[in-house]
Image (cartoon, grey):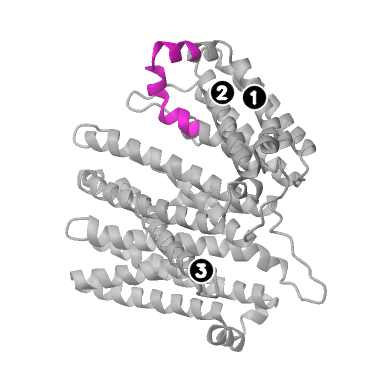
Amino acid sequence: MNLRIGTRLWVGLLVLLVLLWATGLLAIQHYPGLPSPPQITVWGLPAFRYARDVASMVTLGALVVGAFLIPGSSRRVLNWAWGWATIWLLTLAALLIFTISDVEAISIFDALNPDTWWQFLASSYIGRVFAFQFLAISIVLVVMTLLQRTPAFVIKAAATGCAVIACGAPAFLGHGGFTGEHVSMTISLAIHIAAVSLWVGGLAVVVAILLMDARIAAVLLPRFSLMALWCVIVLAETGLLNASLRESSITAFVSTLYGSFILLKATLLGWLIYFGWIQRTKVLPILETSMQTRALVIRFAGTEFILMAAAIAISITMSRLGFETPATTPSAFTPLAVLALALFIPALIDTAFRHRTQSSSPGNARVANLLRNYPEVASMLLLVMVVETAGIGLPVFLFGANAGTLISSLLLLVTGWLWFISINGPRRLTGIILAMIGFPIAVILSDSLSDASTSWKLILLTVVAAECVFVSLIFAGFRTKVTVIEPTPLESSHA
């Protein structure tokens, strides 16, 4: 079993810890007259859930790649799947103990009592979902043992089907009742989790295989690329459905933490789609001629792993956070929503359409050159728009909550995009430094002007994340351009 598969995915544990701290989810919640779980449970439960998710993803990825994508199957990769399925089973057992400690507000040692966890598995809805997962993973292990002896298609399909069902089973923990929209929400979430698991785990296994034997790239990468494309389509559709069921208004995506996390996840998906498109259009066509194919795939995959890890950490934070009611305050943009709209999404737009803007019409070219020659103007415009959007909210007062929020979001996106265009010129350092100095001030000022107060932890997280973007942009200017693919701001930040 290869324990180094998807090593960078474990960076998400640090991201998860920071997000839980910033949202106050690492503190014990005390309710009058009710017991509270111990501190070790509050910390350990999300950590073991993350480990369970990674193990399930690698298991499914290794099973599908080893059984279907490699010609004639691969016994070594199937052995990886069997080993990671064992880790999956063990982490699920640890997660069960921490879940019992959390639900029943008892110590870990009390939760280890056989009578306690057996009664929990048999009598509670959450326990029955765990029991189903244990059964499904056990069947996967048994079927994969048979698969190593007889690689028949029926056995491959049975093992893959059980693994997919086991990956999607945690979705049923979100809703106890199956009425109305809960049915659609639960089933779409299960499909969403299965698609993500296949994509993330498959990429991790493909990279591990390429590190051992780059000659298989010409066969393996086109097959995985097609599978990944379908996974992205499925998870985008199911993610859109889940978001529409959970958040019924535009304001919810910018005024609540839960909605802001949905916005951040959508942004991360956009970046992952962009990197996948780059690999599909620029790496796959040179598989037969380029000696740098493996290096290119691994370089992009390393960035993708970090983005995927952040998305997994955000998902776990959202599950711990729960749904929120949208704020009634007119200018209630959370700092995380401002960060996504002002920097993360504009960076994606600028990176994806940079060459098109450079070859645009003469009128647009003159505007772009003007921005590049005077980046301080775009920087000040961005900072003013941050304060106006998150602190004043004039469009909301003029046009109402939904229309005003949409207008403010679009204005912030446009000014962010103009700022990224302005720093692509000879005076880029001036624009970056001005934004680096002014962005923390703008965020703090916005919070003081807004009627919706924000915790200092979230403000600090937003400021630190923004400063990391600015620093990465500074270092990106000193990097030598790659002749095949031009480095992007986000890629440079993870170099």
Q: Does the magenta segment cover residue 261? A: no
Q: Which mark is residue 352?
A: none
Residue 483's x, y, as percent?
34, 23
Residue 39's x, y, as percent?
72, 66
Name the residue located 35 percent from the left edge and 68 percent from the top edge: 82
Q: Sort mark 1 into few (<14), some (14-19) or many (20+) by Cα contacts within 10 Å.
A: many
Q: Earlier in the sequence, mark 1 or mark 2?
A: 2
For the N terminus, give its image quadrant.
Answer: bottom left
Does residue 160 lie above or below 6 as drawn? Answer: below
State the extent of the magenta-drawn residues as a range: 347-367
> Looking at numbered disc 1 in the image, what kind of residue is underneath it?
Ala
Residue 204's x, y, as percent?
38, 52
Name the residue located 30 percent from the left edge and 71 percent from the top edge: 159
Q: Sort mark 2 into few (<14), some (14-19) or many (20+) by Cα contacts within 10 Å.
A: many
**Viewer-closest of 241 and 207:** 241
> Does the residue at mark 1 contact the one at mark 3 (Cβ under 8 Å)?
no
Q: Earlier in the sequence, mark 1 or mark 3?
A: 3
The answer to whether residue 151 is seen in the rendering is no
Q: Which mark is residue 419?
A: 2
Q: Which mark is residue 435?
A: 1
Q: Which mark is residue 182?
A: 3
Q: Secondary structure at mark 2?
A: helix
Determine the CA span between mark 1 and mark 3: 44 Å
Q: Disc 1 vs disc 3: which is toward the camera?
A: 3
The answer to whether residue 454 is seen in the rendering is yes
Residue 266's x, y, as percent?
49, 46
Q: Residue furthest right?
A: 32
Q: Does the magenta segment cover residue 362? A: yes
266 to the left or right of 378: left
> Does the residue at mark 1 contact the one at mark 2 (Cβ under 8 Å)?
yes
